[in-house]
Image (cartoon, rainbow, N blue to C red):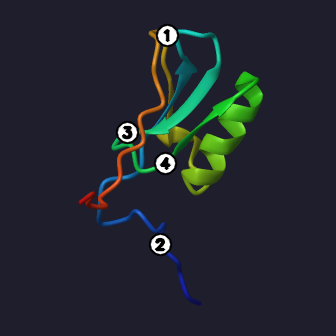
Amino acid sequence: MMTLAPPWLGSAPLIVFVGRNRRGNWVAREQGGSFGGLFVSRDQALKYALVESGHHPECIIEVTREIELDIRTNSRTT
């Protein structure tokens, strides 16, 4: 029998924050800013966070303070 480990085993798991921005939109954003999105409803934001976290609900944190979608890229601008 072969046992498969979660993809984040051996490294820090992805943490996804879910909350509202200053305009009232729902935001789902990875802690480091590598992915995220704006959503009309809390349910949509949580569903996205669940899929992007590899179906690990323990990696999703719902925040009560305002959060903004701030996606960071590693690309260089010249």
Give the foreground label among 2 and 3.
3
- At numbered mark 1, what does the secondary structure look like: helix, strand or loop? loop
Query: Residue 62: image x %, image y %?
Result: 53, 23
Tell me the kind of residue under disc 1: Thr
Dots 4 and 3: beta carbons under 8 Å? no
Give the foreground label among 2 and 1.
1
Query: Residue 10: image x %, image y %?
Result: 30, 66
- What's the distance in space between the residues labelled 4 and 3, CA to CA? 9 Å
In the image, 47 versus 36, the foreground residue is 36
Residue on which disc 2 sits: 5
| Quarter residue 15 falls in | top left
Q: Is residue 20 above or below residue 77?
A: above
- At numbered mark 3, what does the secondary structure look like: helix, strand or loop? loop
Give the foreground label among 4 and 1.
4
Q: Is residue 37 above or below residue 10?
A: above
Q: Is residue 10 above or below residue 38?
A: below
Tell me the kind of residue under disc 2: Ala
- What's the distance in space between the residues labelled 2 and 4, CA to CA? 23 Å
